Image: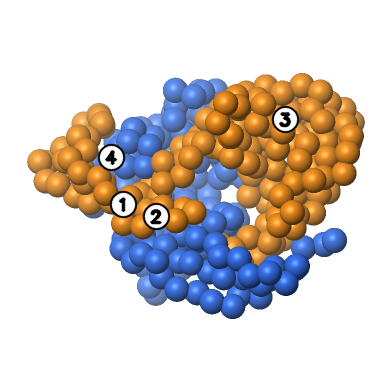
Chain colours: A orange, B blue
């Protein structure tokens, strides 16, 4: 049996907030209907950013899901009228103060139970050009790690680093 | 400024279903309270599984979030009284029909706006021992790819493969 798209027969909001929850009903291959709770989320960029010296540009931030500080590459929603590349350059500059020398699209990732699109971009030859402005209430810390150190660190539980997917794409693309 | 945990002042369910939505209120470093929508989810295992010949053992399944077929390593919730290793062995056998020769814990990953724990394990020397049983309504397809092919394929948009994080951990751990 090769899987194919299922017919959606119903959809409603169970909750609408900053995040929203959809209940979608699908007609399964066996003819039965089944409801799935799906998290509604939009398209956002994730930016694997490096300086010309191959330092990874990273952030640390308290996160309300695990209620702990996690580290990651910078991320942000795409504004209307922005391309993913423009959003990546803007978010990187706002959140970290670094300007990207070059930005390229890598991949769009999906998850099973969310409508999100995680658009992965690579920013190279980044240079610090301003103090991070960001949203005043993001309370994030910017830090950098030399490539060799980054590659060790990101694999540790203690790093609480969750951008491993885009890291794989970036390191393979760069041949690092 | 180095980020530190924030004090949680309130928490309530906005929706309770198969997935649930929490609204958590935190006291920010600036003394202001702010609400965050957080998706409640539990601990689940993800199993990067390979045969003795280094074939990756993968699944394809229609997913209600993006409403398309995605591919991944096999995943599943941990039953009460199970260790992550036991859950990984059980899920792998149920979903794919492969028995793991060896299972080892690699890493627990978190996400910013969900309570989930994504527990990543590595299963090696896996052998096909039974027909996949799985849940009768999972409608998934099992397939394998030789290592070299897997490494090319997983980077393509067309693969719709979303287990890149655990793939990075597995390939680094195995030195492949």
Q: Chain of mark 2?
A: A
Reply above or below: A144 against B119.
Answer: above
For the residues labelled 2 and 3, the Cα–Cα distance comes to 30 Å
Mark 2 and 1 residues: CB-CB less than 8 Å, in contact?
yes
For the residues labelled 3 and 4, the Cα–Cα distance comes to 39 Å
Q: Position of residue B124 (x, y in %)?
A: 50, 46
Q: Position of residue B40 (x, y in %)?
A: 44, 63
The residue sitting at 32% across, 42% down in the picture is: B64
Mark 3 and 1 residues: CB-CB less than 8 Å, in contact?
no
Reply above or below: A42 against B159.
Answer: below
Q: Position of residue A88 (x, y in %)?
A: 68, 32
The residue sitting at 34% across, 66% down in the picture is: B16
For the residues labelled 4 and 2, the Cα–Cα distance comes to 31 Å
Q: Chain of mark 4?
A: B
Is disc 2 in the same subunit as disc 1?
yes
Question: Which residue was labeled with disc 1?
Answer: A13
Residue A66 figure quarter: bottom right
Does residue B23 appear in the picture of this structure? yes
Task: Determine the residue located farthest toward the left in the rendered image.
Answer: A31
Label 4: state its secondary structure.
loop
For the residues labelled 3 and 1, the Cα–Cα distance comes to 33 Å
Question: Which residue was labeled with disc 2?
Answer: A16
Is disc 3 in the same subunit as disc 1?
yes
Nearer to us: label 3 or label 4: 3
Rendered-image quadrant of the C terminus of chain B: top right
Rendered-image quadrant of the N terminus of chain B: bottom right
Left or right: residue B153 compared with residue A156: left
Residue A127 figure quarter: top right
Label 3: state its secondary structure.
helix
Left or right: residue A15 compared with residue A58: left
């Amino acid at each position: 049996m090769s899987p194919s798209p299922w017919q959606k027969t119903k959809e409603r909001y169970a909750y609408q907030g900053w995040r929203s929850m959809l209940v979608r009903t699908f007609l399964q291959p066996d003819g039965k209907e089944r409801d799935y709770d799906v998290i509604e989320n939009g398209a956002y960029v994730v930016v694997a950013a490096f300086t010309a010296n191959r330092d990874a540009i990273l952030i640390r931030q308290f996160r309300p899901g695990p209620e702990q500080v996690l580290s990651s590459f910078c991320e942000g929603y795409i504004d209307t009228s922005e391309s993913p590349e423009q959003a990546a350059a803007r978010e990187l500059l706002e959140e970290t103060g670094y300007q990207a020398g070059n930005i390229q699209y890598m991949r769009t990732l999906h998850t099973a139970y969310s409508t999100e699109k995680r658009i992965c971009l690579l920013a190279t030859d980044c240079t610090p050009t301003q103090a991070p402005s960001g949203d005043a209430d993001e309370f994030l810390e910017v830090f950098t790690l030399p490539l060799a150190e980054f590659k060790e660190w990101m694999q540790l539980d203690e790093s609480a680093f969750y951008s491993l997917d885009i890291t794989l794409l970036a390191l393979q693309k760069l041949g690092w």
